[in-house]
Image: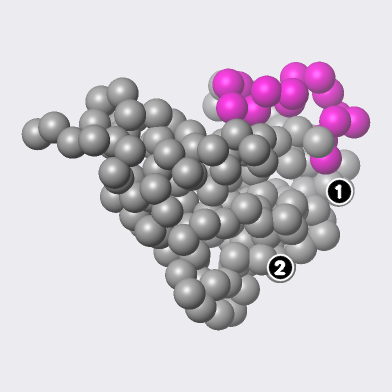
Amino acid sequence: MSFNAYDRQVKDEMTRTVVTASPEETVLEALVKMEKSGVNVLPIVDEEDRCVGVFSTSDLAIITDCLSDQVKDLDHVSETSRQWLIEKLAEHGIGARKLADTCCQKVFAIGPDVSISDAGREMLLRRVHHLVIINDQQQLEGIVSSLDLLAAFVKGAPVPTN
């Protein structure tokens, strides 16, 4: 089935079942959640399911900079390296920090009816790889990644998940 990717909206490409965290969770809890879920970003949501921040592997690399150069590229580290990081976070107390104190509180969000080309422009402008999708009540509806958008343009379908 063929379609014009420029006519597609992010609601057609976004991930609707999003792994999230609360502001009260710790960095260590977030890292374990990211590892178990195989995600690189966790929207931080409050009690009303409003996105109040985002915690990503980039944030983790910044706060763990003092630990080792080995964590500079967390998207590509092995399971053993992630386990090492979890142990180091526990040792140094960094893992006990609350996400509310460490996550990026600047949320780049768009609505579900935004075109995927406009979403791509927003990612480029903001220099991010994920955008949070929110509804009119500012509640989390999904998330879209740069790979989701690329897949829509290149293949005309979402990237298969493992």
Q: Which amino acid does label 1 sit on?
A: Gly
Q: Which quarter of the figure is the N terminus placed in? A: top left
Which quadrant of the view contains residue 72?
top right
- Is-magenta flag for residue 10? no
Residue 98 x, y percent position in the rendering: 77, 60
Residue 102 x, y percent position in the rendering: 80, 53
Instruction: Give the vertical position of 142 relative to 95 (above or below).
Output: below
Q: Circle 2: is it few (<14), some (14-19), or many (20+) Cα within 10 Å?
A: some
Q: How far apart are marks 1 and 2 (CA)?
A: 16 Å
Residue drawn 68% across and 23% down?
73
Give, as a single range, the part of the protein colored magenta: 63-77
Residue 145 x, y percent position in the rendering: 47, 40
- Is-magenta flag for residue 72? yes
For residue 72, the mark is: none
In the rendered image, which residue does mark 2 sit on?
24
Instruction: Give the vertical position of 156 relative to 109 (above or below).
Output: above
State left or right for residue 45 relative to residue 88.
Answer: left
State left or right for residue 110 relative to residue 83.
Answer: left
**Is residue 33 shown to the viewer in this render?**
no
Q: What residue type is labelled 2?
A: Glu
| SS of the residue under disc 1 | loop
Instruction: Give the vertical position of 93 relative to 107 (above or below).
Output: above
Residue drawn 34% across and 54% down?
11
For residue 93, the mark is: 1
Which quadrant of the view contains residue 24?
bottom right
**Disc 1 + disc 2, Cβ < 8 Å:** no
